[in-house]
Image (cartoon, rainbow, N blue to C red):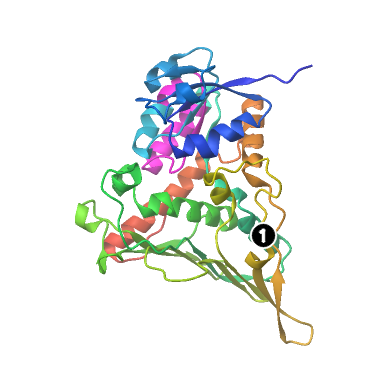
Amino acid sequence: MAEKQFNVGIVGYGLSAKVFHIPFIQLTPSLKLHSIVQRTPKSGNSAPEDYPDLKHYTTPEDLIADPDVDVVVLCTPPNTHYPLTRSALLNNKHVLVEKPFVPTSKEADELTALARQQHRVLCVYQNRRWDSDFLTVQQLLKEDKLGRIVEFETHFDRLRLTAPAKGSTWKAGLKMDEAGGVLYDLGSHLLDQVFVLFGMPDGVTGRFVNQREGRIVTGDGSEEQEPDSVTAILSYKNKGLLVFVRAGVACVETRQMRFWVRGTKGSYHKSGLDPQEDHLRAGGSATDKDFGKESEDKFGRLCIVGEDGKVEDQVCPTVEPETYIRFYDLFAKAVASGKEEDVPVPASQAAQALRIIEAVRESAKTGSEVGP
């Protein structure tokens, strides 16, 4: 018996749709690319030109109302996610939403409840759960290579001293209240991974900085108080664990820090980012040989306490990548089953990560530790 195919409609035709979604939908047997929304196609950037055999719309509402569409993938700015997700669910569509999910945990909870009411799956595209460096960290913890973890650092640092022009992209135009800015853009990746590893923290301390201008800011909603960099400390009291989350724009390094994990039996140090995004942005395909594999010179370092009590320093090979293909494979299976427990990144988990984000924001304003 042939596997059922589900028609997928894409809302938005920017980098996210072109690089992270359409190619993977086309590689997933049970999903069929059916339609695309692009408000203003132009020569050289036109979904109708690129995919002449598909249906095309210029408004999300028309695609969402199409009875032939089974799944809606939202590749739009995050301030549009709540109303579009709600509309799609009410039209009995399964929904995949780009990160950041929505501006508030309250909205995330409402959409989670609506998806359950409508018996539809609702998933958030936290693709970096399938980064090979993160999978390496998960394996080290699962195998107890490092012992009890006492400190965990996760970074997304860059050298970008010139701010992008206002309005050049949604990332350069939206404030935190609209799920814009570094905390929601990069912080949502980092905090989602921390949530996967350790669950909800007991306390959160956050600090916001405008590193380009050299100012500590509060993120109170005004333009001048918007940060370009963030540091957060998450406390897990019953584990005796501190987690440091950092994303900055003034980091002058040849090898940018990614993870530094310290335990009672060893530590793991990793620099550089997972190669999948750069490969895809450069025009590569997920079907290319060695897609997602790191070269040996990018492997992390592992320090382990030997039987003689001496510390041994060794190369730690990055695990074989599952790649972002795995995300879409799991998502397609969830659509087929209709079960929330099969969803690779359920909206309920994204809501928890948003509670941590909200605690970071509150702490940055008050200067105090906040419980999420």
Q: Residue at x 31, y 42 (%)?
A: 178
Apparent side of residue 155 relative to residue 222 in the rendered image (left or right): right
Q: Residue at x 72, y 54 (%)?
A: 320
Q: Closer to the camera, 256 or 362?
A: 256
**Does 126 sit above or below residue 153?**
above
Residue 111 is inside the magenta segment: yes
Quadrant the N terminus occupies:
top right
Residue type marked 1: Thr
Q: Residue at x 46, y 25 (%)?
A: 47
Residue 254 is inside the magenta segment: no
In percent of width and height, residue 247 lies at 42, 61
Q: Secondary structure at mark 1?
A: helix
Q: Which residue is mark 1?
A: 136
Q: Is residue 179 visible?
A: no
Tell me where the magenta segment starts and ends, as one range. Answer: 86-115
Quarter where residue 110 is shown:
top left
Q: Closer to the camera, 183 or 351?
A: 183
Quarter where residue 336 is shown:
top right
Q: Closer to the camera, 259 or 14?
A: 14
In percent of width and height, residue 137 lies at 64, 61
Crowdedness near tag 1: few (<14), some (14–19) or many (≥20) residues, C-alpha within 10 Å: many
